Amino acid sequence: MDRYEINDKTLAIVACNEHLSKVYEDDQSFYVHNSSKQIMEDSCNYFGSSLEGRRKGTESLIGINYKAPIIVEESREIIFFPTSSLRNVDNSWISLNHIDKYYKSGKDITILFKNKITIRFPISYGVLDNQVLRSTRLESALRSRKNGKKTF
């Protein structure tokens, strides 16, 4: 597959190399012949913005611009966060909405998704915990805006 747009079923986009990613959905996984960054860019474009525009939106809402979580689609609150810098070809993207819990696996982290799929990522517990916290702040700010409340 050469193109993919993130949707409600997308759990994670795992970078394999600069031209290949593995996409995990609720009931299947498959490879897409594109970088994780390009998949994210295409998905943001599909929903009417750019990855850079979404990144700036995150900065405006919660003041974060490095490894910023991204609102891919507002009405369904589809929020993904990166595992590392967007410039890193090994950067993967994880859906906040589908995480059940996560735990240390040696130096790595394993995420258990709500559908019982587990994926291991080569990042520390602290990095993942911080990204989940940032994404939750973004989700809260988005909901506040949708409800007409000011966010600072």
Image (spheres, rainbow, N blue to C red):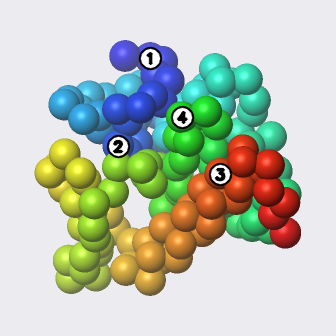
| Residue at 37 percent of width and 45 percent of height | 12
| Residue underneath mark 3 | 143
Above or below, comparing residue 74 to residue 112 in the picture: above
| Residue underneath mark 2 | 11
Disc 1 residue type (three-letter): Asp
- Say which of marks 4 and 3 sits in front: 3
The Cα–Cα distance between marks 4 and 2, rounded to whole angstroms, is 14 Å
- Say which of marks 2 and 3 sits in front: 3
| Residue at 65 percent of width and 51 percent of height | 143
Q: Return the x and y of residue 66 as percentages of the image width and height.
A: 71, 66
| Residue underneath mark 4 | 76
Above or below, comparing residue 28 to residue 46 in the picture: below
Q: Is residue 151 left or right of residue 40?
A: right
- Say which of marks 1 and 2 sits in front: 2
Q: How crowded is mark 4: few (under 14 residues within 10 Å), some or many (20 or more)?
A: few
| Residue at 38 percent of width and 79 percent of height | 124
Disc 2 residue type (three-letter): Leu
Q: Earlier in the sequence, mark 4 or mark 3?
A: 4
Q: Is residue 150 left or right of residue 145?
A: right
Above or below, comparing residue 28 to residue 95 in the picture: above
The Cα–Cα distance between marks 4 and 3, rounded to whole angstroms, is 11 Å
Disc 3 residue type (three-letter): Arg
* Element type at mark 3: helix
- Say which of marks 1 and 4 sits in front: 4
Residue 3 visible in the picture: yes
Query: Residue 119: which quarter of the image?
Result: bottom left
Q: In this view, does 25 lie to the left or right of 21?
A: left
Q: Return the x and y of residue 22 as percentages of the image width and height.
A: 33, 37
| Residue underneath mark 1 | 2
| Residue at 54 percent of width and 34 percent of height | 76
Q: Which of marks 1 and 4 is nearer the N terminus?
A: 1
Which residue occupies the foreground of this view, 61 or 149? 149
